């Protein structure tokens, strides 16, 4: 529906944990933007993406307000799961559904009014680009590992739910190829906000929101200034991935691994 097309999400500032107003007026996010949310433990990272998930209207602990296309979002964005434009994927995302992967995705495509097997196949193959352990279509949803579940949920959010806004809360430790997830979300033109403690994931984003004491302390836009650090982190990440595979395969690591 044209009125459902999202051009912009706006975060209007609230207050920090001590009631002091945040030091920004508004943060504007457009489809295709990738934004990482960083900061120490307890600094308010999850609270910020929760505000977006529920379209806070000065009614959460932070006092923030979220606008969609410059206005308060319509009630059905919040109440109707099929029209909600936000998918939130967390470390705790679990699937309690006793169906095979294929049947689960088929059911979801039908409930969204799509027909045919094609979308199910594309979703499984996209999910398999994100995880090192390929997902078999006949396996039960409850048997998927943490990394496989998160990979499938991201692929489902991109292709079947097709939500324009995707929120990821610390999914990086879950055995998924985080750089491929970010690349795919960019390619599909999603607005992506992710809470992360991972340096590589942070460097891959266009902007970094830095949290402190429950408030946004800074919004950094590196504009290419971090390219050499990013290159270095990609090389380290590849070296760590190689060692991880060697360890998984039962090898002894007797030499330094070049980055
Ligand atoms: N602006 C605020 N005002 C009042 N309380 C807040 C504010 N922001 C966050 N909090 C509260 O502070 C606690 C910690 O916040 P939150 O869980 O968002 O931190 P976090 O940075 O995600 O932490 P972690 O890295 O450990 O997951 C929560 O109980 C949250 O509700």
Image: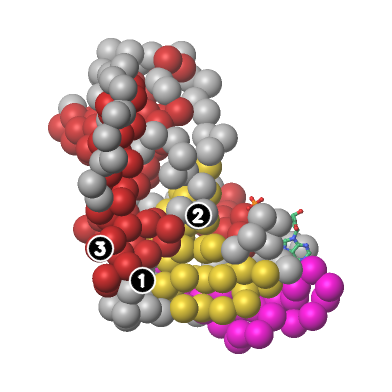
Question: Magenta stretch: residue 135 in it?
Answer: no
User: Which SS class for mark 3?
Assistant: helix
Label 1's element? loop
**Front-most of 7 and 144?**
144
Q: Position of residue 123 (x, y in %)?
A: 25, 35
Locate the N terminus and report the quarter of the image it occupies: bottom left
Residue depicted at x 32% and y 80%: 225
The location of residue 95, given as percent across then percent down, is 49, 25
Q: State the separation of the CA atoms marked 3 and 2.
A: 19 Å
- Is 253 situated left or right of 99 in this image? left
Q: Residue at position x 42%, y 23% from top?
A: 145
Q: Which mark is residue 231?
A: 3
Residue 47, located in which quarter of the rendered image? bottom right
Mark 3 in CB contact with mark 1 (< 8 angstroms): no
- Cα separation between marks 2 and 1: 14 Å
**Measured from the top left, where is residue 170 in percent x and y?**
51, 47
Q: Is mark 1 within 8 Å of ligand 1?
A: no
Quarter location, residue 126 = top left
Residue bearing the label numbered 1: 206
| Segment colored magenta | 1-28
Q: Is residue 94 above or below residue 163?
A: above
> In the image, what residue occupies the spot 67% across and 69% down?
212
- Relative to residue 26, is residue 136 depicted above or below? above
Q: Which mark is residue 196?
A: 2
Mark closer to the observer (3, 1): 3
């Amino acid at each position: 529906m044209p009125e459902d097309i999202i051009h912009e999400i706006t975060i209007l500032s609230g207050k920090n944990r001590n009631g002091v107003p945040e030091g920004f007026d508004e943060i504007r996010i457009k489809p295709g933007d990738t934004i990482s949310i960083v900061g120490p433990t307890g600094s308010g990272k999850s609270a910020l993406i929760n505000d977006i998930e529920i379209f806070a209207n000065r009614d959460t602990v932070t006092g923030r307000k979220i606008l969609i296309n410059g206005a308060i979002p319509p009630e059905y964005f919040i109440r109707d799961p099929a029209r909600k434009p936000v998918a939130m994927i967390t470390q705790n995302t679990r699937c309690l559904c006793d169906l095979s992967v294929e049947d689960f995705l088929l059911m979801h495509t039908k409930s969204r009014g799509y027909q045919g097997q094609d979308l199910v196949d594309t979703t499984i193959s996209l999910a398999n680009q994100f995880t090192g352990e390929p997902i078999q279509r006949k396996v039960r949803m409850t048997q998927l590992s943490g990394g496989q579940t998160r990979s499938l949920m991201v692929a489902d959010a991109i292709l079947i739910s097709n939500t324009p806004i995707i929120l990821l809360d610390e999914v990086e430790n879950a055995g998924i190829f985080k750089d491929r997830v970010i690349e795919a979300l960019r390619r599909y033109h999603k607005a992506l906000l992710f809470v992360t403690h991972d340096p590589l994931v942070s460097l891959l984003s266009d902007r970094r929101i830095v949290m402190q004491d429950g408030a946004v302390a800074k919004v950094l836009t590196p504009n290419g200034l971090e390219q050499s650090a990013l290159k270095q982190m990609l090389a380290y990440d590849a070296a760590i991935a190689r060692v991880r595979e060697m360890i998984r395969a039962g090898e002894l690591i007797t030499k330094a691994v070049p980055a």
